[in-house]
Amino acid sequence: MKAPTLSSWFGRGEVAAPADIESAALRSDRFRLEREGDWRRLEDIVKRMERGGLRRVGDDELLALPTLYRTAASSLSVARETSLDAATLRYLESLVQRAWFQVYGPRKGFFGWLREFLMGGWSRAVREIWLDICVALFVMVAGTIVGWLLVEQDRDWYYRLVPTQFTDSRVPGATREQLMETLAVEDSASGLSSFAAYLFSNNAGVAILAFALGFAFGVPSLLLLVYNLAVLGAMFWLFAGQGLGWEFAAWLSVHGTTELFAILLAGAAGMHIGRSMAFPGEKSVLEAAAISGRRGAMVMVGVVLMMVVAAMLEAFPRQLVGGVDSRLMIGGGMLVFWLAYFFLYRPQRVGDER
């Protein structure tokens, strides 16, 4: 093995003696032989992790990885200080760099994260907040009933609940024909893309607000869900009063099964954070909030995706597809898809397989 000329061997232009070079080479060989087993083991583990992630590494090897990395890093430090042979130095520098990335570097890129998110991470986070979803669902159903009962007793409640952009001809006293016109299909998709952008902005804002208000122990999130579903109950009362209950349900279901599901998840994620802060258990309030916050953030990333889908369904299929049966088929199909994805699709976690 060839050894470099050391700076310490140069005096005033003097060249190192052959005996000194031979001694340095022997020290380098001894140093390498004493530690080469650990280096080779580390290299084997790193190589398998680079090829297939954690699935190719056993538990004992995973536990040994940090120790082997520190051993290699220490060897590199000694090699640099004692100026061992260049080949060993280059090998250790490459090995330590690759091992550092596996020990401390990011586990995956964006596409790897997206794949894990869609292939189990999102649905798993939703299942983990099942109790909050049940509470939010109960509140939403109650809000719909409350909205119906309020406008049935006093029509003035309709104008207090329903936003002005929905009170063009959809008001108490409107004829059946006027209400049917609001459920009719459009002649073309012209201009619907901007409508989709508006709907996405509005609906995503409601969902994000329901999530953000969860820090106040979830109470504002519950109130927001009650209000938004009271609006729906009021409009159901209006259309059902003219015998258009099924037509309105079909018209709404095209995008509503996705949109309302997303709002349900957003409100549940907000309540999950508030509930964990109110009842942290054995954890501190900050620790409980951090854990539930990460879980809620995972759910909210998916909620935004659902809102994009809902806006596209609301702007195009709902406006262009006519017929109660066709609309119910689209809305029901989307509901079945989301239920199956969240509660039936249960892939193994990445790294659980061997």
Image (cartoon, helix red, strand yellow):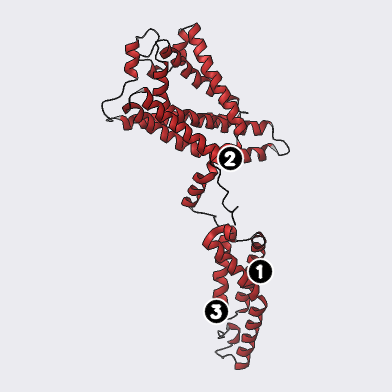
Which structural element holds mark 2?
A: helix
Q: Which residue corresponds to mark 2?
A: 295
From the viewer's perspective, is residue 345 above or below residue 268? below
Residue found at x 46% / y 51%: 111
Spot occupied by residue 297 in the image (x, y as percentages of width and height): 55, 39
The amino acid on which the numbered mark 2 sits, given as a three-letter code, is Arg
Spot occupied by residue 266 in the image (x, y as percentages of width and height): 53, 32
Give the class, few, some or many, for how many residues have Cα within 10 Å of label 3's Cα (few <14, many ≥20).
few
Foreground tag (3 vs 2): 2
Could you tell me if the residues under marks 1 and 3 are in contact, i.e. CB atoms within 8 Å? Answer: no
Q: Residue furthest right?
A: 282
Q: Which mark is residue 281?
A: none
Could you tell me if the residues under marks 3 and 2 are in contact, i.e. CB atoms within 8 Å? Answer: no
The amino acid on which the numbered mark 1 sits, given as a three-letter code, is Thr
**Residue 296 shows up from this direction:** no
Q: Which residue corresponds to mark 1?
A: 71
Quadrant assignment, res 282: top right
Spot occupied by residue 121 in the image (x, y as percentages of width and height): 54, 44
Q: Residue furthest front?
A: 325
Measured Cα–Cα span from mark 2 to mark 1: 36 Å
Q: Is 287 situated left or right of 162 in this image?
A: right
Residue found at x 58% / y 68%: 44
Could you tell me if the residues under marks 2 and 1 are in contact, i.e. CB atoms within 8 Å? Answer: no
Q: Which mark is residue 87?
A: 3
The amino acid on which the numbered mark 3 sits, given as a three-letter code, is Ala
Which structural element holds mark 1?
A: helix
